[in-house]
């Protein structure tokens, strides 16, 4: 299990600060006791996940949800808890001005406002030492004829170019795509091809972000992973899982085999190599399940599937593939998937001074009871703020 | 155009009170000036739509969003404005108790609470003279294993049976189905088959409600319409349109030809016959477009597609179908669809003392300016209340 | 593992004779050496699968592909090889007369021809002792307007009723549904609701057949399994798997977790109880992979997933479900799925005198080389004949 | 209607020779009397479509289905009938060698064979004066693990580069993408992004081919049209329509509004400008409908939708878009769609000396009776040869 060891050593999963806050659907947001009121409390929860799993050393911020006056202090606070601040995510979808678009808006003033927001995010990155600016846009239209598809693309290209000029030498702009939602008829960055065309035009420090929940039904996601790694344009992942739409469920929950196939292509394409630059991040909504354990479970799922993926006997696989033996090739592949890696991972954790069962360790820790007791009053964090 | 005339005379479209309030996505709810603060203001808006179109004589209520102390007064208020109160829609998805289900909940107390809510709705119906209790459930689960699929069905059947016992002689229980959302893994009434099985078990006054946005991609909705009419179990429609999920766009906006095919099967199956009992209702969310004109446009879309559907030369169609002439049959069908019925409908409106162009008439009326001026202060209605 | 033992003891998988013949797509049918030329050779291949797995004791016939003069001799031949003849599948999709339908055709003569074909199949059943007549119809239309949806349903009901009158006391009519293909616009039995409505009208010996590849994208198949078991109308399965359309891949190959969830509901709903009457059949196309090993792999996949499903700690699951602990319930469920049951199943096989690894045993057996040598000349079996 | 006039003058639709031959599904190919036996007879049928519509001046060839010894004679034959030979389509999916791929195959010999086939196609182009070599690949895999996704991409790139070296100055290589089928797990060119990445790497004379039936459910195709025109990489269309899979129905039959939106973006992006280089081709299968009228209907559908698209009042549309008036913008758009352009197009045909109703003119012409009488004996053309 040495390749597995090396692969797991390289595995590092970024947690999104907002996963610890409340989230929901257009029908209802259910709140839970202990929900963080501040970015500091979100970071504390994230640090707890890292303490128990050893694999989640960074926390992504969402601006303005996580805006503070002093980011250096925030960074120091995080480091005191054993984690670092990571990707900065922009937000141009919750201001009334953005009803009809942000970076694509017909009104130059609105576009400039959205551009300025991103420049502000870059300033945050300069303070926090973050490498990645992640741009996900809610831009799109709900009705045919509502907007000029072509004109919106041109304005998007122009806005992105302006932002990109401010991306520092060690920094990257990562452009996420999404098939639909909140826009219903057309989103302005609906597929990897569109993101790829834009980041290729921008330059070397612009990359694609692949959110596993943002595709049409039936899309072969691992193909896109392989293709983007081949084109050297896979910047980062937003991990989650889905049955139908952008369900934002725990990664691996809906289709574990798909996660296995994705991780196999990540390993195959060098995406876990130390210098690959591929960031693995969670982006999930724990609407009905407990949030901190939801994040722990997610980290474990990625870990377990990465171990399975690394277990594939690539020599035997190649041999079967080259001889046209479909069933043998598939069997080699499935053998790794069906192998129960959990005992070995538990031992590995023990060797690293981590709890063998992080889920059980969290329950035993009393952390949940503690935050339910302490976090009384104030406004629980959510997408609203 | 005499069949068309007769068909259009029978056409009556119910408006949902909530379409006049704010709605949105999990990302953002945009508000607009003039949004109603009360059920009375919603009814006033609906009455405006009816005054301009002549085809929307009833307004559906949503309880508790539209709860008032005195429903007889509310009915009188509506009649003063020229409309009547229609279907009563229950709501068991916004109370914290319903996080894990309502009529299907494992806890008998929660189930009883949900049953009692429906009995309360029946009392509202008794006051308002409404015929239909519409039951749409958000019940479902997000993760495999979260609930016992079979047990939930059994509890659902029991809860519905209890409610059905209180349905009066001239009343009906109408059970809506939905493929997904807000639940992501499983909804408890996901398809027409499930709704049909339950209402068949209940009795003659239980019917299926078909929401045009609640199906899997690629589903042939007009087939379901034809089948339910054949089985005498089509109770009502919730009209809207969608490109991907339950987008709740203006009916006919996403796929006008689909609406044509649906209305053709409604006419074919006798769904517009005076005694058919099929209720046609809108159920839409005007997230980015103006609300009252959005409803007017919807009524016009249904009217226009019904006219086109009634124009199909069924004699020629049958002849082509029976002779196996695929292209001739399709041509007869498409000829009706491609006919521009708008001038004839405008003339028809003039003959009935209605504005030829209800959209333009609304703009000219100054109604929007008036409500924007008058409706200041208070809380704009939304799904939240 | 005693529940698992009992469950596996009850597990019996029927093989389709046509899986051993050539199949393909509209683009190309690739042939392979050793393909059977006769039904006898298909049965010999099926018997080989049973000899190696111990779980596939019956072979389904397809008429007229497998038509012979003397079915009693054919049955004796099968029994000599250690298997029995099972379900009889009708075929009304390869005769020019059926271009526009069979049991639904507008022409009474064509309908009668299709009915007579089914009566012929019942006679075959009388000879072979088969219990089930499986009816899958290619009936449908490609263009809107091509056929009268409602009229086709009425004719279907009438035709089925005529056939059902000839179904003997110990026999059943099983009606399969399919979302699309070969018809593109509408199939006449597109969903379980339609099949359910028809078989309910027919009587107690009419049941629904669920083919796992015949649903819209995103459909929760295990829900349908649970529902049909609850309604006592699940007659049989056609097992296969798919990524996009009706791919007819090896069961469990595309989404092993889905197969696990389906088998869990089968067990949960009593579908493996000796008296349940639920028939588990494969229905697959081995277009690019070896056929006999493809069937062995399929039997093993069903066996392994059934073992995993039976491993679910239902006591712990219920407790977690009833306490609303989503993650705990999901964890109990996933723990069974992630358990590697293969070593235990290998031991179990050895205890039953079967090869521990049926795939390897087939390779070692020399059977493939033997049939490649012997089956020279003649016409390889395929869907064509 | 002057813009419309100009737009229609620029509209030219290429017919596929194979649409006149038999086609079908994996279940059955129905044959029809009068089906061509030779490429000459296919061209004669295509010329008939052009004679009646005036808009289909070229015929695409498929090699080897349409292979002849003397292409110059074939070209002269076509010109005598009033049409020209157009795009050359390669075929690497019907030879046993290609079971596991062609340009992507692991075996260098098979790749070379597939490359050589394309070089042969270029020689045909040199003879016929064709501009475009269209490459559609059936390459892909059916099972996870069967092939190395990344390695296949690399080999594909290398093979394409070799072919591209032989593309002449006035010639183009057009690479088609397809979501699925015949491969079920992965196709090697599944989406426009992959095709775009490859043709961008090849050079200026390599372009993307967009087949309207080759997308995931819910894909916004007009967005891709707008994007590819913006990127100057839209080479050609394969027009058809679909409800579920790659149904290859008559263009516009399944969703006329979608065809309208596509043609609007084509016009908007300059795709009908004389120098745009965008080729509009049909690629359909008339499985149950008459073939020549099927092609006539298709040409008319494209014509009618182009006229509607050109009718959009772009000034009013832009104004509504820029003012954020969603309903007004949508109304401008829909007004053009709902306008019945058929009478004006009939007049236009009469002015050009064409029959007002090409469908009726075909019926009157007696052409079908003639070919049914003359084309007796021989083998009807089909995908097989």
Image (tube, coloured by chain):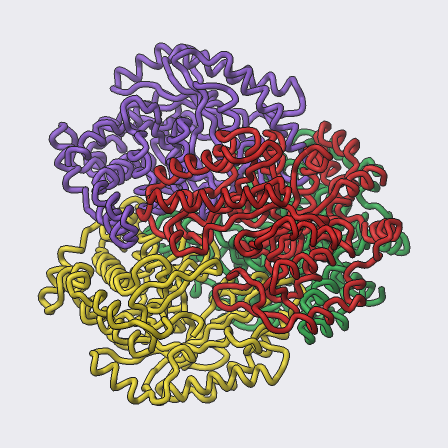
Chain colours: A yellow, B red, C purple, D green
Image height check: is B380 above or below B4?
below
> For the point 73% across and 70% down, which residue is it?
B370
> For the point 68% across and 54% down, which residue is it?
D257
Q: How many marks?
A: 0
Q: In this view, does A339 lie to the left or right of D86?
A: left
Image height check: is A229 above or below D252?
below
Is residue B208 at all visible to an observer of this figure? Answer: yes
> For the point 66% across and 48% down, which residue is it?
B85
Q: In this view, does A156 lie to the left or right of C169?
A: right
Q: Position of residue A278 (x, y in %)?
A: 33, 73
Q: In this view, does B291 lie to the left or right of A130?
A: right
Name the image quarter holding the C terminus of chain D: top right
Choose top left, top right, bottom left or bottom right for residue D294. Answer: top right
Image height check: is C174 above or below B366?
above
Q: Position of residue A165 (x, y in %)?
A: 47, 88
Q: Where is residue B193 in the image (x, y as percent from the top left)?
A: 50, 36
Q: Between residue A205 and residue D358, name the one nearer to us.
A: A205
Q: Where is residue C136 in the image (x, y as percent from the top left)?
A: 49, 28
Q: Between residue D152 and residue D217, name the one nearer to us.
A: D217
Q: Between residue B316 and residue D106, name the one nearer to us.
A: B316
Name the image quarter holding the N terminus of chain D: bottom right
Choose top left, top right, bottom left or bottom right for residue A101. Answer: bottom right
């Amino acid at each position: 299990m040495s390749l597995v060891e090396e692969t797991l050593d390289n595995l590092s999963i970024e947690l999104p600060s907002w996963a610890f806050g409340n989230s929901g659907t257009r029908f209802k947001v259910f709140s839970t006791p202990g929900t963080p009121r501040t970015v500091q409390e979100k970071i504390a929860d994230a640090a707890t996940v890292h303490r128990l799993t050893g694999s989640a050393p960074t926390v992504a911020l969402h601006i303005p949800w996580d805006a503070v006056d002093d980011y250096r202090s925030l960074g120091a606070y995080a480091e005191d808890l054993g984690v670092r601040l990571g990707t900065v995510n922009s937000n141009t979808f919750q201001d009334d001005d953005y009803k009809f678009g942000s970076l694509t808006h017909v009104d130059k003033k609105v576009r400039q406002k959205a551009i300025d927001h991103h420049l502000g995010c870059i300033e945050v990155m300069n303070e926090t030492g973050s490498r990645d600016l992640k741009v996900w846009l809610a831009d799109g239209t709900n009705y045919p004829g509502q907007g000029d598809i072509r004109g919106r693309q041109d304005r998007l290209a122009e806005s992105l170019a302006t932002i990109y000029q401010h991306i520092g030498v060690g920094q990257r702009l990562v452009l996420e795509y999404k098939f639909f939602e909140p826009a219903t008829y057309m989103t302005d960055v609906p597929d990897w091809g569109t993101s790829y065309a834009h980041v290729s035009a921008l330059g070397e420090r612009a990359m694609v972000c692949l959110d596993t929940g943002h595709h049409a039904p039936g899309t072969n996601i691992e193909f896109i992973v392989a293709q983007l790694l081949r084109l050297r344009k896979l910047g980062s992942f937003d991990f989650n899982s889905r049955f139908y739409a952008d369900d934002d469920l725990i990664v691996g929950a809906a289709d574990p085999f798909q996660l296995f196939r994705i991780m196999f292509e990540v390993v195959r394409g060098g995406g876990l190599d130390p210098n690959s630059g591929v960031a693995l991040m969670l982006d999930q909504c724990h609407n009905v399940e407990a949030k901190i354990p939801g994040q722990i479970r997610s980290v474990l799922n990625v870990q377990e599937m990465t171990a399975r993926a690394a277990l594939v006997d690539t020599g035997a696989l190649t041999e079967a593939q080259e001889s046209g033996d479909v069933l043998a090739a598939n069997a080699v592949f499935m053998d790794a998937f069906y192998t129960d890696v959990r005992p070995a991972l538990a031992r590995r954790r023990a060797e690293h001074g981590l709890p063998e069962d992080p889920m059980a360790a969290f329950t035993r820790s009393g952390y949940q009871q503690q935050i339910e007791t302490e976090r009384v009053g104030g406004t629980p964090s959510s997408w609203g703020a």
